[in-house]
């Protein structure tokens, strides 16, 4: 199950600024193989980042395109090199994935600039700066979780250990995010070298959360809150969280740091998504007719 949420920060409402965060999620298929995408982006709030809400939107769209290209490689490895497909896919995710992500984002920004030029005009990295944003994403494929980020947006997960849910910041300590209020940015010339990433089996994972930093910064204990939230959602049902998420995020920004908040929650199915392609349409029809015959004989 997937659930997205995005709220305008209390400080942004007070200053009549737009929400500069974005989120995107979906379950997709390539050649019958399912993969799940979670992505969030946090446009920078400083005065020089005048188009960062657009940069964040382009970032989550670029994440979707990078994932779509990467899964073609992943499926090819899975089919042709089943013994060592995971090693090859991990290498691809750690290196070329982020290059595709950054190139796609820059192309989207450049296209927007061509249609809506800024004055005074700039070139190179300086032209990209007004669109500055972070990005964090996760791709779930073949029982594995692939997570990565540039900047201080991040991924959390809750795993079952000794019968209880334990939460963790998946990318904590992977690489420095800058100093003070600064953060790594897709707009920087060295963005691809700021890519934090981690891959791990999805087994025992009860919940994955992609979020911008307004979420964790507004909580006294983000990890405990997430463990409790996962427990309550499993106990009360997915609709319980769906009906309360917008109000919960709104209270967070009003009572917390006042920043925009974008989130994507993913609750993996109890049984892992299939690694092999599903049955063909003909097989499904034949099975359905057989079952119908048995039911009505």
Image (cartoon, helix red, strand yellow):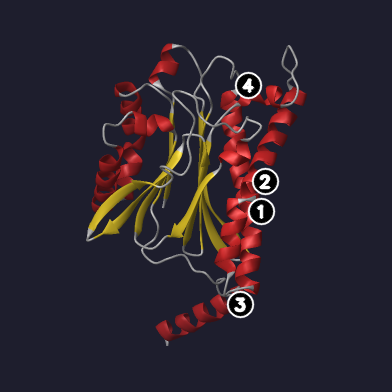
Callout 3 touching callout 4 (CB < 8 Å)? no
Q: Of the two numbered discs 1 and 3 on the same chain, state the one appearing first in sequence.
A: 1
Q: CA distance from mark 3 to mark 4?
A: 53 Å
Question: Can you tell which of label 2 and label 3 is closer to the viewer?
Answer: 2
Choose top left, top right, bottom left or bottom right for residue 226: top left
Q: CA distance from mark 2 to mark 4?
A: 21 Å
Q: Residues within 10 Å of mark 2 (few under 14, many from 20)?
A: some
Give the answer, above or below, for where 224 lies relative to 49: below
List x then y, in percent, for residue 223. Answer: 29, 42
Residue marked by disc 4: 130
Q: Residue at x 32, y 22 (%)?
A: 254
Give the answer, above or below, for where 121 lies relative to 71: above
Callout 1 touching callout 2 (CB < 8 Å)? yes
Q: Residues within 10 Å of mark 1 (few under 14, many from 20)?
A: some
Residue marked by disc 1: 69
On residue 282, the disc is 3
């Amino acid at each position: 199950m997937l659930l997205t949420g995005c709220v305008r920060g209390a400080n942004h409402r007070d200053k009549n600024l737009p929400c500069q965060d974005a989120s995107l999620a979906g379950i997709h298929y390539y050649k019958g193989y399912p993969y799940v995408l979670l992505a969030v982006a946090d446009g920078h709030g400083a005065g020089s980042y005048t188009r960062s809400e657009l940069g964040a939107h382009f970032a989550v769209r670029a994440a979707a395109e990078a994932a779509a290209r990467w899964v073609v490689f992943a499926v090819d490895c899975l089919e042709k090199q089943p013994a060592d497909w995971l090693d090859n896919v991990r290498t691809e995710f750690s290196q070329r994935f982020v290059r595709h992500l950054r190139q796609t984002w820059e192309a989207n920004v450049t296209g927007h600039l061509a249609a809506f030029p800024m004055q005074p005009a700039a070139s190179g990295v300086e032209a990209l700066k007004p669109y500055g944003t972070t990005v964090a994403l996760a791709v779930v494929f073949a029982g594995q979780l692939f997570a990565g980020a540039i900047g201080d947006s991040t991924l959390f997960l809750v795993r079952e250990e000794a019968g209880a849910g334990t939460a963790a910041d998946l990318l904590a300590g992977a690489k420095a995010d800058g100093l003070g209020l600064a953060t790594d940015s897709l707009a920087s010339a060295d963005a691809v070298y700021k890519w934090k990433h981690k891959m791990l089996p999805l087994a025992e994972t009860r919940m994955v959360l992609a979020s911008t930093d307004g979420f964790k910064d507004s909580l006294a204990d983000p990890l405990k809150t997430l463990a409790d939230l996962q427990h309550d959602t499993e106990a009360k049902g997915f609709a319980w969280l769906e009906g309360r998420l917008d109000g919960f995020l709104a209270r967070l920004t009003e009572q917390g740091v006042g920043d925009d908040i974008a989130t994507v929650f993913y609750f993996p199915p109890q049984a892992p998504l299939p690694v092999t392609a599903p049955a063909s349409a003909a097989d499904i029809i034949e099975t359905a007719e057989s079952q119908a015959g048995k039911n009505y004989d």
